[in-house]
Image (spheres, coloured by chain):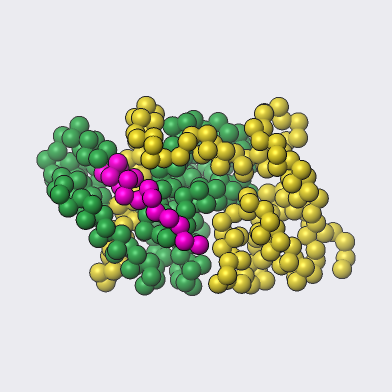
Amino acid sequence: MAVVNRKIASQQEIAYALRNLTDADLRRLERIARFRIIGLNDLDWQDLLHDAVARLLDGTRRWPKDIPLVVFLRETMRSIVSEHWRRKKNTPVLSEAQLHRIDDTERHILENAPDTTTNPERQMLASETLAKIEKVFQGDPEAMRVILGMAVGKSPNEIQKEAQMSSKRYATTQRRIRRKLAREFADRRVTK
Amino acid sequence: MNARLKEQYQLDSLLLGLENEILKLDDAEILSEEANLFAHIEDIRALVNSNVRVYLDIEDSSSTLPTEDMSSDFEQKQLESLVVPNNPKERRKLLETLVSSQTNMPLQFRMAFSAKNEPTEPEVDAMIARLIRLGILKNDDTDE
């Protein structure tokens, strides 16, 4: 792989970029944070987003400027959840090398790195969460096909091809999935 | 791979897939999706800016950017004057006090001092270093 010299944003640049996030970007971050805490009962989305922003500003996470800020914050939130599990049980966590492994053909810096933080409690919660999601969509086989495809890491194109769905139908199904999950997990109370 | 571990990876993949779809949505679409299920945009902006404001106030006192909430200025000025002691016990005490009294401390810090946890000395030092990098604390240059 070619070595790419990435320009890292200064703290000042990060601060101004955060200030200039659009309404749509802020909503994206909220939605992503809400997704990322699905299955967790001791972390709320505000804490997660707050901490991700703090880590950018204090230099704990270095933002390469060619990666969209929202994408980078998504990856930061993902790593925070990984760390959250490590703190709960003394288990392996995503390494710095994994966190910053950047494929120059891929904008998503963590997409292909598996989340290796694991412990029995986490596995049990994942199992329960998947069961809950399955229950929510038990009367919607089309949504289940999309969910199962995403769960095994298939791309949208692969899912559409296998399920013989048009892109329009896929987008409609995705919208339905988002709406149902948002409703299902919106009222979750955090126990601290 | 056992079944449970497999499910953990499946959930992570599913979340990634859902997040990717969110990233791909155009602005109009994401803003039109059932706003009643989500936070007010201004609340999210305030959440993000609570960190930014601390940074800008410290690093760029000449900034002409408006600050929406000036109520924490006094609190911030007090924080800026804090100096990190050399004594490990005092450092721990200072950090513990900050975590319990400041609402804008990172989640990681609050978790470190939660009922079940007692951070080690290196962990305390790492957190202190982070606050120094952020400009919230200053090193004590005097000898003990």
Furthest toward the left, the residue is A164
The reply to whether residue A78 is in sight is yes
Q: Is residue A23 magenta?
A: no
> Can you say whether B45 is above or below A127 in the image?
above
* Residue occupying image coordinates x 50% and y 62%: A192
Which chain: green?
A: A
Please state the horizontal and vertical placement of residue A25, each as a whole percent of the image: 45, 35
Magenta residue check for A188: yes
Residue for point 43% across, 55% down:
A189
Q: Which quadrant, please, contains the N terminus of chain B?
A: bottom left
- Quarter holding the C terminus of chain B is bottom right
Answer with left or right where residue B81 lies relative to residue B29: right
Q: Which residues are magenta?
A: A177-192
The quadrant where residue B58 appears = top right
Q: Main secondary structure of the magenta part?
A: helix
Q: For chain B, give the colour.
A: yellow
Question: Residue A148, how many percent across, how many down?
Answer: 21, 53
| Residue A177 image offset from top left, x and y in percent | 26, 44
Residue for point 47% across, 36% down:
B40
Q: Is residue B26 above or below residue A94?
A: above
